[in-house]
Image: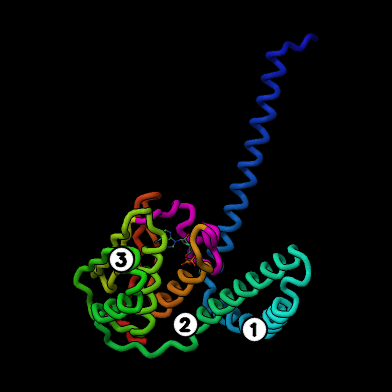
Amino acid sequence: MKIEYKDLKAVNITVKEKKEKNKAGRENRKNEEIQAAAEELRHSSAGLEQFAYVTSRALEEPLRIVARYTQLVAQRYKGKLDADADEFIGYIMDGATWMQKLINGLRAYSRVGRQGKPFKPTGCEAVLDRALTNRRARIEESGAVITHGILPTVMVDASQLVQLFEKLIGNAIKYRNGEPPHIHISAEQKGNEWIFSVRDNGIGIASEYYERIFVIFQRLHSRKEYPGNGIGLAICERVVERHGGRIWVESELGKNSTFYFTIPINGDK
Ligand code: ADP
């Protein structure tokens, strides 16, 4: 049988299509696995908090040794070995600083439940004012315009609510779109809960990442593009969870994101 060139081309295209299909299938399966693991982690965050606590404690000492001796090597041998050695020492020091930040983040995560304070009636406008004061430098430097609607009084750990607003507003400023950030905070009563929202006009988030960004250490960008350690939203979720609420995001990619969280009315924990 004579095989025509056009037949070969057709076979080639089918093989290519098959390969692409397989690759897409593998990627889908991988995404589904990550999604499932992310879901599982979200549902066991009390256990994760305990794990974060013991892990951060256990890693402290070895990291201290690595950081200390790298510093000593840098002080004693910088400029005395070759240029490569200086460069490598620089990388090790950066790595140690990075790891220190991750461990600090883990510790902060582990404190939400362990060191949380009792809930008291708290005016959210005062809480927001405090969060804005704490972030004043970032707000002024970015030219952010921040507005808010009428905010209620709720039963919360005030310092954790300040932390929550600070983190969401901080992210709204960090993930901006080249334009000055416009951020609006509001609250709406629905059934027996308040739904708070923090809306920005930033880079947005693709819908396939709506769940994953709340998982500890999950980030969508490199540290060069946007600095960070991927712990902020995991802490936000723990704080909201401790108050008996939920947190989620809705977004238009490239245009805006709105982070929502709920606080039950008559929360009496
Ligand atoms: P970090 O900011 O340190 O990376 P977070 O846990 O606060 O960690 O956020 C996780 C990821 O969610 C970020 O890396 C970013 O990709 C995405 N993200 C968070 N907030 C926003 C926002 N307001 N707009 C766009 N993306 C966001």
Asked whether, in this view, residue 119 is left or right of residue 100, the answer is: left
Identify the residue position indicated by label 1 in the image.
Answer: 60
Identify the residue position indicated by label 2 in the image.
Answer: 112
Q: Residue at x 40, y 54 (%)?
A: 204
Q: Amino acid at mark 3?
A: Ser
Which sits in the foreground, 143 or 211?
A: 143
Name the image colouring. rainbow
SS category of the residue bearing label 3: strand
Q: Which residues are magenta?
A: 202-224
Q: Amino acid at mark 1?
A: Glu
Mark 1 surroundings: few (<14), some (14-19) or many (≥20) residues within 10 A: some
Separation (CA) of disc 3 from disc 2 = 21 Å
User: What label does residue 41 carry, if any?
Assistant: none
**Mark 3 and mark 2 residues within 8 Å of each other at the beta carbon:** no
Q: Position of residue 141 (x, y in %)?
A: 34, 67
SS category of the residue bearing label 2: helix
Closer to the chain start, of discs 3 and 1, is 1
Q: Position of residue 93 (x, y in %)?
A: 66, 73
SS category of the residue bearing label 1: helix
Q: Residue furthest front?
A: 79
User: Residue 200 falls in which quadrant of the image?
Assistant: bottom left
Identify the residue position indicated by label 3 in the image.
Answer: 197
Q: Position of residue 203 (x, y in %)?
A: 40, 54
